[in-house]
């Protein structure tokens, strides 16, 4: 008896990869166009035909950063195209061989830190200092990411690059937009309150006249508003804005890539690692937005301080990713609610002591005995928080490794998980 021929297998389009491809192409295109626009504006400014003023020393940094953004999009495009064509990406698995890379990278970071701290004294051109600005941020964050990902099963490399691109081209811009709106609202509320205070009316009249505002005309306003620095309400407003509302926004949207994977039935290990990647990417981009503005000793201080900030973003997003994946298994939503409250409080506490340390470093007076005492202890508190986060990161990694199944074969990992990568 002759058996009938097997039915043809109908290939289904992997829609998630299509969306990943679209996002990565858009991100790459916008990064390249932004770089070209920056070069054009710089050229027009040199020729005297541009009304836009740019800091010539910062242009190389922006170009290097846009180049980095472009590079982040390329692997995502390649993996998405391969997945659409039916090919699966290898598994992402950080083993001991990656630590050999770290053993080389960390001494290189120390060299970068030393050269960058002497860049002003040695008169190094911006073309050299700009990649130093990027390397001094990238190397520690990659090391912290490897600590969190060590020997954990995650899925395919395509999924990892999808998390990176979602954070780079969606999450970062969304959070930035929301924070700008938040700060604009805060400024408007403060301005309305100030204009309604009769004692400040004479000082604020300079804005109503529509004349030119000079340093001499602003001085009476500064002298009149200075007593506000002693008002507890001002400190309460700043703490509310920077230490509560901003962390609430960031911790909600930072693991956006993990939320988009919710339908994939992630394991807790996969949720944790996806969150780590989202948080590390966010921390990288946020740190790059600050490091280029300082130099000399302040540059070294900022570079070292941003290690703690990068750890904070990586750590909190990883915990949120774990909580989300675990909640999807047992539907105990109280867990993810409590985790969100916890990471917001941790983030807010970090922001509070970071602000107090910056104020203390600038030797600005704080008209509050409590805040003054906290400011003096801020450095130690931040170091303690960073050590605690690093220890807990290692402990969570160890716990998840012991509970996870042995890693699947790289060539089957994506197919078995039916995931993005």
Image (tube, grey):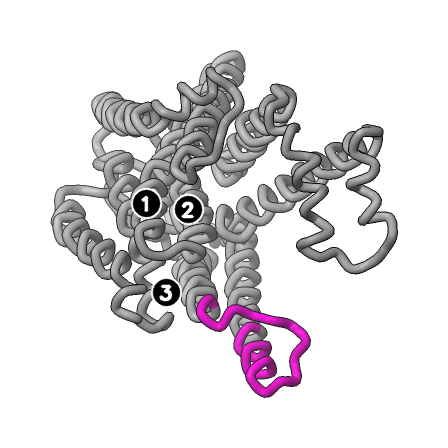
Identify residue for label 2.
281
Front residue (pair 286, 31): 286
Q: Which residue is mark 3?
A: 130
- Tell me the number on the disc at residue 126: none
Residue 118 in magenta stretch: no
Mark 2 falls on what kind of element? helix
Going from N to C along the chain, the mark reached first, 1 or 2, is 2
Please check the rendered image and state whether residue 43 is part of the magenta-colored stretch, yes or no. Answer: yes
At x 36% / y 31%, what residue is drawn?
315
- Residue 317 spot, x, y in % from top left: 43, 32
- Quarter of the image for residue 236 reads top right
Frontmost residue, 412 versus 233: 233
Q: Secondary structure at mark 1?
A: helix
Q: Which residues are magenta?
A: 38-58
- Where residue 231 appears, as percent x and y from the top left, is 63, 22
Tell me the distance, in whole angstroms, between the alpha carbons under discs 3 and 1.
17 Å
Looking at the rendering, which quadrant does residue 396 occupy?
A: top left
Most foreground residue, 275 or 359? 359
The residue carrying mark 1 is 301
Residue 102 in view here = yes
Q: Is residue 338 above or below residue 145?
A: above
Label 3's element? helix
Give the mark nearest the N terminus, 3 or 1: 3
């Amino acid at each position: 008896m002759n058996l009938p021929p097997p039915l043809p297998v109908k290939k289904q389009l992997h829609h998630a990869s299509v969306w990943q491809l679209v996002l990565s192409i858009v991100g790459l295109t916008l990064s390249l166009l932004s770089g070209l626009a920056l070069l054009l504006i710089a050229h027009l400014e040199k020729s005297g035909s541009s009304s836009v003023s740019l800091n010539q020393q910062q242009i190389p940094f922006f170009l290097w950063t846009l180049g980095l953004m472009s590079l982040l999009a390329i692997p995502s495009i390649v993996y998405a195209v391969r997945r659409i064509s039916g090919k699966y990406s290898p598994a992402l698995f950080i083993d001991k061989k990656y630590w050999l890379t770290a053993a080389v990278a960390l001494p290189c970071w120390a060299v970068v830190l030393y050269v960058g701290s002497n860049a002003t004294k040695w008169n190094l051109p911006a073309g050299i200092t700009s990649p130093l600005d990027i390397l001094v941020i990238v190397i520690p964050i990659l090391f912290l990411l490897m600590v969190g990902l060590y020997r954990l099963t995650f899925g395919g490399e395509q999924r990892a690059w999808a998390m990176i691109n979602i954070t780079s081209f969606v999450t970062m811009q969304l959070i930035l937009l929301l924070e700008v709106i938040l700060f604009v609202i805060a400024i408007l509320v403060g301005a309305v309150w100030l204009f309604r205070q009769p004692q400040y009316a004479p000082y604020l009249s300079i804005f109503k006249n529509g004349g030119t505002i000079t340093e001499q005309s602003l001085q009476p306003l500064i002298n009149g508003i200075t007593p506000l620095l002693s008002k507890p309400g001002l400190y309460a407003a700043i703490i509310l804005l920077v230490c509560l509302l901003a962390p609430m926004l960031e911790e909600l949207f930072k693991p956006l890539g993990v939320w988009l994977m919710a339908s994939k039935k992630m394991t807790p290990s996969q949720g944790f690692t996806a969150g780590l990647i989202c948080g590390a990417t966010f921390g990288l981009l946020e740190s790059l937005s600050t490091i280029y503005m300082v130099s000399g000793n302040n540059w070294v201080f900022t570079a070292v301080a941003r290690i703690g900030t990068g750890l904070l973003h990586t750590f909190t997003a990883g915990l949120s990713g774990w909580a989300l994946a675990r909640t999807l298994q047992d539907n105990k939503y109280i867990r993810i609610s409590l985790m969100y409250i916890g990471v917001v409080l941790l983030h807010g506490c970090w922001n509070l002591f970071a602000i107090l340390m910056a104020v203390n470093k600038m030797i600005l007076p704080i008209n509050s005995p409590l805040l003054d005492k906290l400011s003096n202890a801020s450095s130690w508190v931040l170091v303690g928080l960073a050590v605690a986060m690093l220890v807990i990161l290692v402990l969570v990694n160890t716990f998840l490794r012991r509970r996870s199944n042995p890693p699947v074969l790289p060539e089957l990992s994506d197919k078995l998980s039916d995931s993005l990568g």
